[in-house]
């Protein structure tokens, strides 16, 4: 195991702390549940995440995120997203507050906690998400903006992502394209972000994230 590399990834991954399963988009109904697996690669470190969600009510849900790296499981992250949905004619959206806690389940695990505040809306042609989060000594903002192409029982999103992070370990800005496709109960997401700015760190290279999710 490489505990330092795993710890570094947990410190730097915006996807781990800002986004919620499944792909920020589903399920949107009471009694729903889903799972997703994602593979992230950043700064020469590859980590696989297993994540899940259950909705008692579509506005009250529970999530988990468990990383796997270099043959070992990392620290389990639990969250309770609390959402307020709204409809404005052809536009739907939600406000969300998500407290999260990290349990020391890994070999070199430690307790940690954070929270995120997000706002998202969607029309038949446009999607936007803004997620401001804090985690330990880190504060970040993740923004997704782009086009939506709905179909019959399916949909396609072509988005642009901007991620900003400020922390004691350094600051960074990354940006790049996101592709999301869903058909019935299956969702696929792929993204690439280029590191356009960094300060007081040795981060290097682009960020790649590919995920596949299922909702029921």
Image (spheres, rainbow, N blue to C red):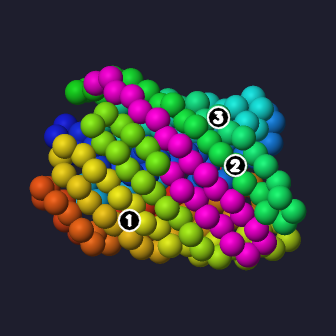
Q: Earlier in the sequence, mark 1 or mark 3?
A: 3
Q: Position of residue 127 (x, y in %)?
A: 65, 67
Tell which residue pokes out farthest to the front in this image. Answer: 88
Q: Nearer the viewer, residue 83 or 6?
A: 83
Per the image, the residue denoted by label 1 is 208
- Helix, strand or loop: magenta stretch: strand
**Quadrant assignment for the C terminus:** top right
CA gap, disc 2 to disc 3?
10 Å
Q: Is residue 20 left or right of residue 85?
A: left
The residue identified by callout 3 is 82
Residue occupying image coordinates x 53% and y 43%: 117
Q: Quadrant of residue 58?
A: top right
Q: Which residues are magenta?
A: 110-131
Q: Is residue 66 visible?
A: yes
10 Å crowding of disc 2: few (<14), some (14-19), many (20+): some
| Disc number lying in front (1 or 3) | 3
């Amino acid at each position: 195991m490489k505990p330092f590399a795993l710890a570094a990834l947990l410190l730097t991954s915006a996807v781990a702390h800002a986004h919620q399963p499944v792909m920020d988009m589903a399920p949107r109904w009471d009694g729903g549940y889903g799972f997703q697996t994602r593979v992230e690669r950043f700064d020469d470190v590859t980590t696989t995440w297993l994540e899940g969600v259950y909705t008692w009510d579509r506005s009250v849900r529970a999530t988990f995120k468990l990383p796997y790296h270099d043959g070992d499981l990392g620290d389990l992250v639990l969250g309770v997203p609390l959402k307020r949905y709204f409809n404005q004619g052809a536009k739907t959206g939600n406000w969300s507050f998500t407290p999260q806690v990290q349990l020391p389940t890994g070999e070199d695990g430690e307790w940690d906690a954070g929270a995120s505040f997000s706002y998202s809306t969607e029309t038949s042609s446009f999607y936007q998400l803004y997620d401001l989060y804090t985690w330990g000594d880190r504060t970040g903002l993740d923004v997704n903006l782009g086009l939506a192409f709905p179909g019959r029982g399916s949909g396609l999103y072509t988005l642009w992502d901007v991620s900003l992070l400020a922390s004691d370990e350094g600051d960074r800005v990354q940006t790049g394209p996101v592709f999301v496709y869903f058909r019935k109960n299956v969702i696929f997401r792929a993204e690439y972000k280029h590191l356009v700015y960094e300060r007081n760190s040795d981060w290097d290279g682009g960020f790649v994230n590919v995920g596949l999710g299922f909702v029921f």
